[in-house]
């Protein structure tokens, strides 16, 4: 294969871009989290302080962080509960010729505009909207609508890896388990689930981190609900260092989660 | 696992319920774009094409559409070059830091978009504007989009390079072709469909992006998603928003469908 010079030529342009336009900007914003603002001009003052992170430990912000985590976990669990049986249906129950169609059926909402999907749920839950006129009741804008919408938004990100996991699962294992007398539930618990765990973990990386950072869908269907993303947004103009600290917090939570998931070997599937 | 007839029925019912859950909200938006009721009472009291003709005449969405297309093309062009180069380097060479780089490529879509957004915004305010006189606008939108579009191209090209193996290139080199000739006559023709598929998907990703764009687009250059978001909470604009929403979904799906046809089923999963 090629020489070292060719490698340098290949790597230099993309690395320059990623380091300058991306990592540089990220590093700067993480550094900003340790700065402060002038209370009169709202300008960033470059003196080292940890007061932004100390402020995060106040009950108000701990509650917001807790709420955001709760939403992310709930959405992730809901996505697993819906995606696993559905992916099983796609891989094992549905006739073979339908499979392409089903995969396409999941890919369309994966790529269909994120904003429009969130907006679609606004029209679903709004007073006098589809839910109210069909079921007689609607959760309205707020916590429940946010969970519903985020579950809807990230569901394809869970279905596809789990489906790929089912595809890799040899049918012979399932048959062997059945031949040895295992009932459906038992086979699911002892054969399917362990083999599927890395795929599910890969899916949770998306559902968890996307829920953690979301602020657009929350604004659209959440009413006045406050989560990490919306508080970042509110602080940007007046207190950028504090907004940076909030953003850093979500990145730190995500990195911790990635490391935990990495131990299951799930990231090899990404 | 041999599932009984009853279990199968339960699975079918469940799957149909999930598909309904997935498609009903999108269908409602499409139907609402014809809803004659201004506040979108459900079920629609009547159907009209008024909003469609109004939306197609409105200047706001049209300008936003142009910005979106320009941003998508610019970002795709940059990502195309950078993503392909990176993919060639990472698949065809073994070197120190290789794993770190492959992680770095996915960071822009893995980290919360709002963090990337405020990072780029403060670069615009503190460096680009005072030092280079560049304001938030089309250029900064393109830079932001290109950064997270690289991964889509990278994934598509990498998958193709892995499947190709290196034997054809080795054969070409053995026959005396220089590296550039090999690339022109062997590697690139084999990569072409993966590159085009990647480009289509990168365009789709850019076209639909709102989180990072919120922070990199100036007030004068909204993209189509930004325009929709700005008008989402204005009751008078609601009918037009519905029409633009349908167009946005259609335009973001079309490239994906084309990419699938070109490069196989897994192309569209390169977003994962």
Image (cartoon, rainbow, N blue to C red):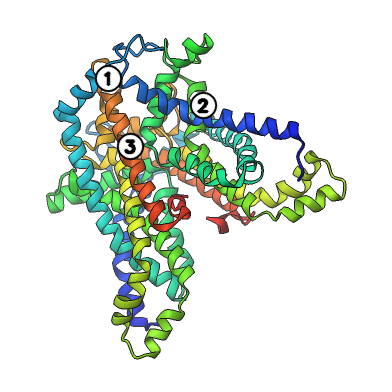
Residue holding disc 3 = B250
| A108 versus B157 height, above or below | above
The single residue placed furthest to the left in the displayed view is: B133
Q: Which residue is mark 1?
A: B239
Q: Cα distance, mark 2 to mark 3?
A: 24 Å
Pointer 3 indicates a residue of which chain?
B
Work out whether A157 lies above or below A231.
below
Q: Nearer the viewer, residue A75 or A168?
A: A168
Residue at point 31%, 77% (across, down): B185
Q: Report which residue position mark 2 lands on.
A: A148
- Residue B179 visible in image: yes
For image coordinates 36% across by 74% down, the residue present is B187
- Give percent across and percent down for residue A258: 55, 50
Q: Are marks 3 and 1 in contact (CB under 8 Å)?
A: no
Q: Are marks 1 and 2 in contact (CB under 8 Å)?
A: no
Compared to residue B172, the image places residue A43 above or below, namely above
- Vertical position of residue B139 compared to residue B170: above or below: above
- In the image, A191: left or right of A219? right
- Could you say where residue A81 lies in the image, as x and y percent from the top left? 63, 35
Query: The numbered mark 2 sits on a residue in which chain?
Result: A
């Amino acid at each position: 294969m090629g020489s070292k010079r060719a490698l340098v030529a290949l790597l230099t342009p993309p690395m320059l871009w990623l380091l300058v336009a991306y990592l540089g900007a990220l590093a700067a914003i993480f550094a900003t989290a340790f700065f402060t603002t002038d209370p009169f001009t709202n300008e960033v003052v470059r003196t080292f302080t940890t007061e932004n992170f100390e402020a995060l430990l106040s009950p108000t912000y701990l509650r917001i962080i807790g709420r955001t985590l709760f939403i992310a976990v709930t959405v992730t669990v809901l996505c697993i509960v819906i995606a696993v049986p559905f992916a099983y249906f796609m891989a094992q129950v549905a006739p073979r010729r339908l499979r392409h169609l089903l995969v396409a059926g999941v890919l369309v909402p994966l790529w269909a505009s994120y904003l429009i999907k969130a907006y679609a749920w606004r029209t679903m839950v709004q007073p006098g909207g589809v839910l109210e006129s069909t079921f007689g009741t609607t959760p309205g804008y707020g916590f429940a609508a946010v969970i519903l919408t985020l579950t809807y938004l990230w569901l394809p990100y869970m279905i596809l890896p789990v489906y790929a996991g089912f595809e890799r699962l040899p049918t012979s294992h399932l048959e062997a388990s059945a031949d040895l007398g295992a009932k459906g539930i038992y086979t699911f618990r002892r054969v399917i689930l362990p083999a599927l765990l890395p795929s599910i973990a890969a899916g949770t990386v998306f559902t968890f981190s996307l829920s953690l950072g979301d602020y657009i869908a929350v604004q659209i269907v959440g009413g006045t609900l406050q989560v990490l993303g919306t508080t970042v947004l509110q602080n940007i103009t007046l207190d950028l260092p504090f907004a940076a600290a909030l953003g850093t917090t979500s990145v730190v939570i995500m990195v911790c989660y990635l490391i935990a998931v990495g131990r299951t070997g799930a990231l090899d599937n990404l | 696992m041999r599932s009984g007839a009853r279990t199968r029925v339960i699975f079918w019912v469940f799957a149909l319920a999930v598909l309904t859950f997935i498609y009903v909200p999108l269908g409602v938006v499409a139907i609402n774009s014809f809803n004659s009721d201004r506040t979108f009472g459900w079920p629609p009291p009547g159907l009209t094409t008024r909003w469609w003709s109004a939306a197609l005449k409105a200047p706001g969405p049209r300008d936003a559409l142009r910005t979106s297309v320009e941003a998508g093309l610019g970002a795709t062009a940059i990502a195309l070059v950078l993503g392909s180069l990176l993919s060639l380097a990472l698949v065809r060479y073994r070197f120190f830091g290789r794993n770190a780089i492959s992680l770095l490529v996915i960071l822009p879509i893995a980290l919360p978009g709002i963090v990337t957004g405020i990072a780029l915004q403060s670069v615009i305010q503190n460096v680009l504007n005072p030092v280079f006189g560049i304001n938030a606008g089309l250029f900064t939108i393109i830079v932001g989009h290109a950064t997270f579009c690289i991964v889509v191209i990278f994934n598509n090209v990498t998958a193709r390079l892995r499947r190709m193996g290196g034997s054809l290139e080795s054969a070409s080199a053995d026959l005396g072709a220089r590296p550039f000739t090999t690339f022109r006559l062997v590697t690139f023709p084999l990569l072409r469909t993966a590159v085009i598929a990647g480009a289509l998907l990168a365009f789709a990703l850019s076209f639909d992006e709102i989180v990072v764009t919120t922070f990199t687009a100036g007030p004068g250059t909204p993209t189509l998603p930004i325009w929709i978001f700005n008008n989402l909470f204005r009751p008078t604009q609601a009918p037009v928003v519905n029409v633009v929403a349908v167009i946005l979904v259609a335009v973001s799906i079309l490239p994906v469908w084309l990419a699938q046809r070109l490069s196989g089923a897994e192309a569209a999963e390169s977003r994962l």
